[in-house]
Amino acid sequence: MLRLWTAILVLFALSGDALAESPTLKRIAETGTVRIGYVADAPPLSFENEDGDVVGYSIDLCRHIASAIRFDLGLEKIDIEFKSLVSMEDRISAVENHDVDIECGATTVTLSRRERVDFTLMTFITGSAVLSRKDKAISAIDELDKKRIAVVAGTTTEDVVRRVAEVNDFRIKLTPIETHDEGMELLNKGKVDGYASDRAMLIGQVFRNANVANDYTMTRSALSFEPYAFMLSRGDTEFRLAADRALASLYRTARIRRIYQNWFGRYGEPLSPIVEAMYQFQAVGE
C-alpha cells in the first residue's frame, strides 16, 4: 500500500509542476513519443543491425529511460522515434534545436559541449586509441610519428591526436572523416596507417566482421580518458532528473551488468574496474 501511494504521489508531482517546467516532458505526455538521436555506425553503443533495427548498449539504456518516463507520466504505452545523426555538430545541434529529446550514442562529456547541451549521469568510460592492421602495426603512441591517421572530425579524439602530435613533435598527417565506416574503409584499403577513435568504438568496428578480426591491432595504452553520457536539452532540469533517476535505478540492479555483457562481453571485453566503479558511484539513492 505504501508503494502504491508513493507511485501516486510521484505521478501527481510529474503531472503538475514537473510538466509545467519541462517542455520535453510536456511534449512526451501529449504525444506519447520519445525522440531518440543515435549514430548508425557506432557499435556496440548504437548501430543498425542486419534487420535495420536500432540497437546497442546506449540504445538499451535509453529504452529503459523511455520506459521509466512512461511509468512516471502514467501513459499506457510510449513510442520511440529514432533519428539518425552523423557528425558531432549534427548531434549537438539536434539536441540544441529540440529535434530530438535525447542523444543516445557515444558522446564524451566536455565543458565546451556543456555550454550548449546538458548531460545525464555518465553511461560509460573509455579512452581513445589507434587501430591499425597487423601487417603495419602501430602498437604504441611513440610509433605515430610520420603516420597517416583517420579520425572523425569534431570529436575529442581529433583534439587528442593533434595534442599528441604537438607535445611530442610528431609529424602526423590527419585525415578528417565523417563516419566510422569511412575510417575502417580507408584503413582496410591502406589509404591511412591507423584509425583513431575511442577504444569502445574500435572494438565494435573490429568485431562487426569476425572473419578478419585478427587482422587488426590496437595501441597498448589509451591516448585519453573519455567519459560518456547522453545529451539532452540545456536547462530542462526536470527531464534531466527523470533520465538520471532512470539510470540510477538501473545502476542499482544486476541488469546493467547483463546489458554490458550482452554488448561488450560478446566482443571479449570484460567489465573493467573503472566502469564497475562508475555504476556503483552513480547508483544514486532516492
Image (cartoon, rainbow, N blue to C red):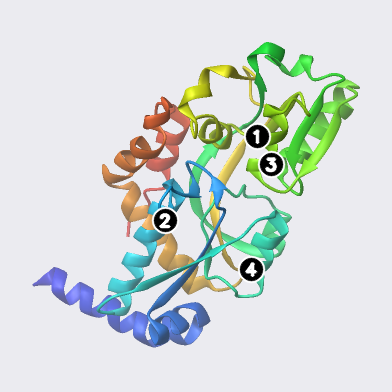
Q: Which mark sits nearer the N-terminus, 4 or 3?
A: 4
Q: Nearer the viewer, residue 24 or 46?
A: 46
In the image: residue 144, left or right of residue 86: right
- The residue wearing badge 1 is 184
Q: Nearer the viewer, residue 236 or 152?
A: 152
Disc 4: CA contacts within 10 A as few (<14), some (14-19) or many (>=20): many
Q: Nearer the viewer, mark 2 or mark 4?
A: 2
Disc 2: CA contacts within 10 A as few (<14), some (14-19) or many (>=20): few
Q: Nearer the viewer, residue 37 or 215?
A: 215
Q: Which labelled disc corresponds to residue 182?
A: 3
Labels 2 and 1 touching (C-beta < 8 A): no
Disc 3: CA contacts within 10 A as few (<14), some (14-19) or many (>=20): some
- The residue wearing badge 2 is 53
Q: Residue visible at 53% across and 38% down? A: 125
**Tag 2 secondary structure:** loop
Image coords of residue 103 (percent x, y): 55, 60
Q: CA distance from mark 2 to mark 3?
A: 21 Å
At label 2, which amino acid type do we have?
A: Asp
Labels 3 and 1 touching (C-beta < 8 A): yes
Q: Which mark sits nearer the N-terminus, 2 or 1?
A: 2
In the image: residue 283, left or right of residue 237: left
Q: Which mark sits nearer the N-terminus, 2 or 3?
A: 2
Q: Nearer the viewer, mark 4 or mark 1?
A: 1
Q: Nearer the viewer, residue 195 or 191?
A: 191
Q: CA distance from mark 2 to mark 4?
A: 21 Å
